[in-house]
Amino acid sequence: MTLGALKPWERPETGKPAANAARFQSLIPVLETERLILRAPIMEDFPAFAEIEMSDRAIYMGGPLNREDTWLDFTQCLASWMLNGYGMWSVTTKDGALQGFVTIVRGYEDLEPELGYFFRAEAEGKGYASEAAKAARDFGIDEIGVGSLVSYIDGKNAASVNVAAKIGGTRDRASEQIFEGTDYTGDVVYRHWPKNGRPDVALEKALG
């Protein structure tokens, strides 16, 4: 997919607006793993985001999307930080090369915060998705205190299912009932609990 020339609204600001943007970006927690850095998304990341969502790599995410919907998705993921206190990270290697994105977001009709992950073609097969998803999961549950997270996954997306299982997610068949009779029939739900195990029964009941 070739994004082509950036539209005016996709171009990074300069001067004082850029400095103001950087001030807000500095509020998003930076997470570091053995090989990766999860940092605040910046405008310069949009072409890589579009590279994924406007291609067949997004086939299990309702895509490929057009450019307008991709832009709306990008901005909504960022708005989640202000509205919900969690959102999207850009994932880079230690040398700064952008590999993909990991999210904790609550999209329209989502009953719970969702852990998501999507990466560029060149990042495939390196274990980056599971490494980044695990870091985001631990932060969301242990630091933000969301209790547990879910991953809504197209049942045919074996790679995404494998990542969810690899980081300790367990199939939540009860939560899959919401998909019955909808366009999402066949989707699966993986639930992610704290790294030290499931919460106590009282908390589990409170989560529904």
Image (spheres, helix red, strand yellow):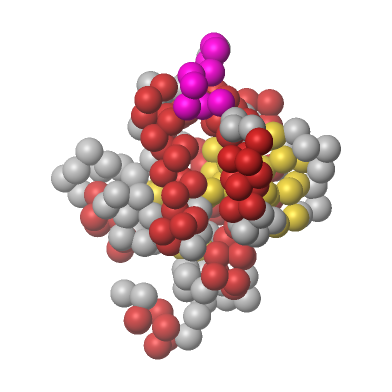
Front one among 93 and 67: 67
Name the spot of residue 145 as percent of width and height, x first. 52, 74
The quarter of the displayed image where residue 111 is located? bottom left
Q: Is residue 16 above or below residue 57?
A: below
Q: Is residue 73 above or below residue 88?
A: above
Which residue is the extreme one toward the left? 181
Q: Residue at x 59, y 30 (%)?
A: 12
| Principal secondary structure, stretch drawn in magenta | loop
The quarter of the displayed image where residue 84 is located? bottom left
Which residue is the extreme one toward the right? 95
Which residue is the extreme one toward the front? 16
Task: Locate the C terminus and report the quarter of the image it occupies.
Answer: bottom left
Name the spot of residue 95 as percent of width and height, x first. 83, 37
Number of marks:
0
Q: Which residues are magenta?
A: 3-11
Q: Is residue 85 left or right of residue 175?
A: right
Q: Is residue 48 above or below residue 204?
A: above
- Residue 106 magenta-highlighted: no
Q: Residue at x 42, y 83 (%)?
A: 203
Q: Is residue 131 left or right of residue 41?
A: right
Name the spot of residue 104 as percent of width and height, x first. 49, 55
Q: Residue at x 38, y 21 (%)?
A: 66
The quarter of the displayed image where residue 44 is located? top right
- Residue 170 appearing in the image: no
Q: Residue at x 59, y 72 (%)?
A: 142
- Residue 128 appearing in the image: yes
Q: Is residue 174 above or below residue 94?
A: below
